[in-house]
Image (cartoon, helix red, strand yellow):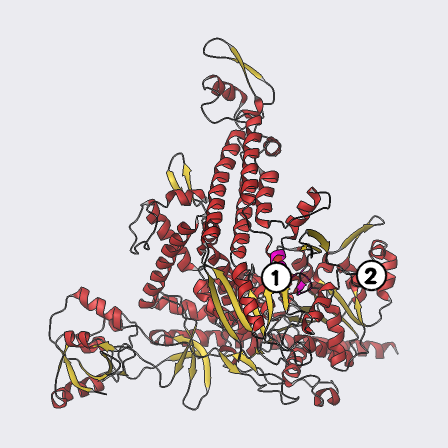
Amino acid sequence: MTCVPLLQQTQRNQTPAEEEAEEEEEETEELGHVDTYADYKPSKSTIGISHPDIVVETNTLSSVPPPDITYTLSIPDSTINCGLLSALQLEAIIYACQQHEVILQNNQRAGFLIGDGAGVGKGRTVAGIILENYLKGRKKALWFSVSNDLKYDAERDLKDIDAPTIPVHALNKVNQYFFSIIHIHQIYLMSFPEGVLFATYSALIGESQAGGQHRTRLKQILDWCKPGFDGVIVFDECHKAKNATSTKMGKAVLDLQHNLPLARVVYASATGASEPKNMIYMSRLGIWGEGTPFKTFDDFLHAIEKRGVGAMEIVAMDMKVSGMYIARQLSFSGVSFRIEEIGLDDDFKLVYNKAAKLWAEALAVFMRAADALCLVSRKSLWGQFWSSHQRFFKYLCIAAKVRCLVELAKKELKAGKCIVIGLQSTGEARTREVLDENDGHLDRFVSAAEGVFKALVQKHFPSEKQRREKARGNKRKRTLTKIVKTLGSSGEVFQTFGDILPCSLPLWLTLLTVVNMPLSGVGWVPKASIEKMKQSLLNKIADLGKELPLNTLDELIDQFGGPEMVSEMTGRKGRVVRRPDGSVRYESRAEQSHTIDHINLKEKDRFMCGEKMVAIISEAASSGISLQADKRVKNQRRRVHITLELPWSADRAIQQFGRTHRSNQVTAPEYIFLISELAGERRFASIVAKRLESLGALTHGDRRATESRDLSKYNFENKYGTKALDKITKAILGHIESKVSPPKGYPGDMKHGMMDVGIFCKEPRFGLSTEKDCSITKFLNRILGLEVHKQNSLFQYFTDNFDYLIEKDKKEGKYDMGILGMEHFHLLWFPQLRGNHPCVLLAEQGRGRNFIVYKPNIGKQAHPESLDNLQLRYRKVTPDHAKDSWESQFNFSFGKCSHANWNGKCKKIEEGQECLQGMRLRQYHMLCGALLRVWKYVADVVSDITCSSILQIVRLKTKNSNKQVGIKIPENCVARVRQELLKMDEEVKRRRKEKEQQRAQEQQRAQEQRLAEERQLQNQH
């Protein structure tokens, strides 16, 4: 290795522009992300045997401790010592029961959230909580989950912890006839004096109108619990209760908690809150409401969403510190994860392009028909159109990957592994439609994509009926229904039809309009022509349907050898199969000895015992079913979990991933995501990536914690995606000149393409413009309908702008990096020495012509320099020549920034801001502890002083390996923040003192009243 002598910077004058460019280049800080996970062991609980598998916790959550334990368990020592409940599960039970002793300020009992990942054993933990309360005399419990089949898992979990005497009653076993006869059903329910009432979330919204009375399942459950109920309510897989304000199910969950204020509520799900807005049903956590910094849930939501993922990470940490939350997951050691991008063959591209062109034509035809019929309200029409458009191209995206998936799966099977394929859409709806059209007979495989397109035109094509319905809904609009005779320009009498006149105009104006225009001149089309347009479109769809791919699920099963070779675990009731003679027929999935309700469990057993080596699961099987390489089953081959179809939400994605990675497994699974080269498919990857990012933050306290964190590069649904979209649309319209050049092969005029997918629209007054409310979601949906080369080029242009904006914000220090780790010896930054002060450095030859650079103030520079670059800016000097300059810079950088060294002063310091560039010693101020309650106040102070509301969360590891997580407070904000916190402290103490005085006065009054009553009794005697 060659050591180059010390180099001294060549003296030359630099323009301000050059200085700015160099400063941007070298000022980038390398405060890197630290490892995402830390090994987990209970820190305060000391009982129980270690969990059978390695369990981890995110570094963010591991940086904060749980509260001290004050609760004493009643669970028998035999259960604990035999390892029926592991140390991890016992810890969760203790903290849940301890939190249940707390009464919130709204007089409701506090709840507990178990956020353990799939496979850690939430089922046994919940069973342990029920057993603990049963032993304390609380004999009734409610257990809600997503599927009636999971009732058997609940019974198994209770049996596994040696509590088989606690009965589990399935609410769905109550005959529907009994449900309609109120008193019989009530007697049936009341015959359960104790035990666990197991029900699905959908059962909560059941209702009856029998005997003239309105009765609901919820009311009957409340009657069974009786007033004053203080037993356990378990919301298992509680992500199903999200969107509580907009769904009946969510509202029922809130109502149940409100009506049973003393119940001991347990929320259990690995995906309990995929987004802050979906936490609304967790009303018992006490994060918002009386006595908290957030009066209402909306206040909490606004505060969190405004401050981004950093605030969501604080929520998770704050919940753990407060003792209301615990979240661990299996170590992903041994799990491999990769994304396979699938190329498209020419034949498929041809079909896809034909479909794109036909959809563009369909859009024009729909518009023409709507104009002809003068439809005033078209919101529903376009809602149906674009929804079908998205589903159609999603089916094509999935179909593009089938061939590759089959090849990949067969290769893995030959290697001694087994396959689990995850998808969401079964295509059953389209199959049932064709079955009905053919009187129950089916002799061919069905194309789900064709069915979507065809159904749109058949059911939602603009029609006279739609126009009449819209007209009835608006009393101010008049409809001309009679034939009007008018005089033509040549004197002859001709007829105009009421059903082709603009129904929104007054009658006299309509007559004037018709008299003064030729019938064929403005696009008014008779009813017969409307029907002709519709039929023409249906014929073209039928022609295209001959080339469209078949239903993915049926084709996959057929490719793998039929139902005899594949365990299908989905929600559909029937399927299309190929017979041995080559003919095709539709058959029910139900078997002679098994009903359709139990067929998924039977198929799971066949896969686990090795009878079948390929399993296909949909959302119906995504909760509760275990498909891992379990040590207790015959089929212990390594699972290769291939995600063919990205789920609509991260909730579903996490549930599917958790099927194959669980406790007690021989080998960890391999995860493979298949994404075609179609740029539009990033839409679905983007949905999942966005939700997973939020999910990692809320569920595990770290946005990088979710299994498929590699998908973050596909997350465009953020402010950078919105800005990038705005820039490319304006550039395409010619309103601005983009700083990012279009990619190679980019079509010259994208305006027509954007019009074909409804992103651009023509307006009479303003010409071509972007559609209102064109969000990033809508854009990523719509570009699916462009031809392959167009959508790929457009998407590349979009992502280039997206990357440019992120890089720009990183350079300007505006990019939210999440939680950054600061090690005591790993802080690197780059000074820039200019002006009359010589800059010296040591260059050591590395690989090729690159040199490793050392500078007096920072030591080793992170990025190597090329020889050409060094020779351009520096010259060789002897150590003696460089000594004075080196020592001067070394000493100066101890307490002052590089700007002060270059220019004698620093603009940032003069403006009252902090500047740490090029300093050898940096002083950081961190605010640690339960931060959620003070977040708003601190953010306001920082924003007021620095004009930036971004609070950087940092994790600090000291020399003796102690960890702290907190908010980094800028130097110039420390005094104000301290003042604000002292004010808050004084206010809290004042309120506490007032409450104590009020309590003392109430106690004194009560004592005086008691003494008065005693004296009164004595006088009476």
Of residues 205 and 460, the one nearer the viewer is: 460
Q: Residue 745, image x and y in percent?
A: 33, 52
Asked whether the viewer can see residue 385, the reply is: yes
Q: Secondary structure at mark 1?
A: loop
In which quadrant is the C terminus drawn? bottom right
The three-letter code of the residue at mark 2 reads: Val
* Residue that protrudes farthest toward the front in the picture: 581
**Measured Cα–Cα span from mark 2 to mark 1:** 27 Å
Q: Position of residue 886 (x, y in %)?
A: 18, 86
Give the residue at mark 1: 242
Position of residue 531 in the picture relative to residue 209 (left or right): left
Say above or below: 500 vs 856: above
**109 and 474: which one is in front?**
474
In the image, taking residue 978 as reference, residue 162 lies left or right, namely right
Magenta span includes 180: no
Which numbered marker is on residue 864? none
Residue drawn where x is 59% and y is 79% of the image = 667
**Counting other residues with Cα less than 10 Å from the Cα at mark 1, is it few (<14), some (14-19), or many (20 or more)?**
many
Looking at marks 2 and 1 on the same chain, the residue that comes earlier in the sequence is marked by 2
- Quarter of the image with the N terminus is bottom left
Q: Position of residue 543 (x, y in %)?
A: 55, 41
- Tell me, yes or no, whether the highlighted magenta stretch contains residue 568: yes
Which type of secondary structure does the marked residue at label 2 adopt? loop
- The amino acid beneath tag 1 is Lys
Discs 2, 1 touching: Cβ within 8 Å: no
Question: Can you tell which quarter of the image residue 743 is in?
Answer: bottom left
Q: Which residue is mark 2?
A: 174
Q: Can the viewer see residue 234?
A: no
Please report the residue visible at 52 percent of the width from the left and 71 percent of the height from the top: 706
Span highlighted in magenta in the image:
554-570
Against 903, residue 463 (above or below) is above
Q: Is residue 746 above or below residue 879?
A: above
